[in-house]
Image: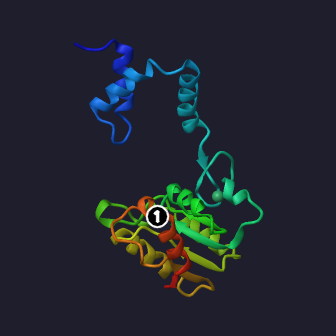
Amino acid sequence: MKYPRTIENLIECFKKLPGVGEKTAERYALSAMNIDPEIIKLFSKSLEDVKTKITRCKLCNNLAEDDLCEICKLQDRDKTTICVVESPKNVVIFEKIGSYNGIYHVLDGLISPLDGKNPEDVKINLLIDRIKQGNIKEMILALQPGIEGETTALYISKIFENKDIKITRIAHGIPLGIDMEYIDSLTLELALEDRTSM
Ligand SMILES: [Zn+2]
């Protein structure tokens, strides 16, 4: 037996989410019937907004709702220090620690030739343009430990090798193969403090 089409459609929608299989999608869809109508409205509006309102910051490629992201808009950030990260998720992680006062650059991925991800597939050109404009004194490479992170860090440091910019990377206290998301904030804060020159 199948559910009515509306429910089947909702199940199919939930299955599009990462980590959600048939059973979980079914549970979500059935429970949706018991959610307050106002919440449902907010739910569907938020889903739509994520597609229509979210864009990328023109400066740092972070997620934004305007030309600039919330961090680039702030006047009191140190605009001479730039922290290079893999994804917008990493920006949120660093912001949660609260001790970093510089700006960011979101690469949107790491170089991984084996997976067909070349330098031009990540936002390195945008980073080069930003550095060319001057003002940046230090670039902190805060990339995921592992082969892709290493390759990307090396590639970037080579580009800026002879430029008047200090390139550092966060300390290697970060365990290999662990997603930055799961590293506790103290470890990450120490890794940021103990950064070393490349
Ligand atoms: Zn920005």
- Looking at the image, residue 78 sits to the left or right of residue 131; the answer is right
In which image quadrant can residue 41 be found?
Answer: top right
Q: Residue drawn 37% across and 18% down? A: 7
Residue 101: x percent and y percent?
Answer: 67, 68
* Quadrant of the image occupied by residue 59: bottom right
At horizontal 60% and vertical 65% (from top left) the residue drawn is 104
Three-letter amino acid code at the position of disc 1? Asp
Q: Please provide percent x and percent y for residue 58.
A: 64, 56
Report the image quarter containing ligand 1. Answer: bottom right
Q: In the picture provided, is 187 more to the left or to the right than 115?
A: right
Classify the position of the N terminus by image quarter: top left
For disc 1, the neighbor class at 10 Å (few under 14, some 14 to 19, many from 20) is few
Between residue 145 and residue 109, name the one nearer to us: 145
Q: Residue at x 39, y 61 (%)?
A: 179
Q: Is residue 191 visible?
A: yes
149 with respect to 189 (left or right) = left
The residue at which mark 1 appears reads as 184
The foreground one among 126 and 52 is 52
Number of marks in the image? 1
Up the image or down, 173 lies above or below 52; here it is below
Please give the name of the residue rendered at 58% of the width and 76% of the height, measured from the top-left corner: 139
The one of 51 and 183 positioned closer to us in this rendering: 183
* Residue 162: quarter of image: bottom right
Q: Report whether residue 10 is seen.
A: no
The correct choice, above or below, for 103 with respect to 70 in the image is below
Residue furthest left as drawn: 1
Give the image location of residue 52, x and y in percent.
Answer: 59, 36
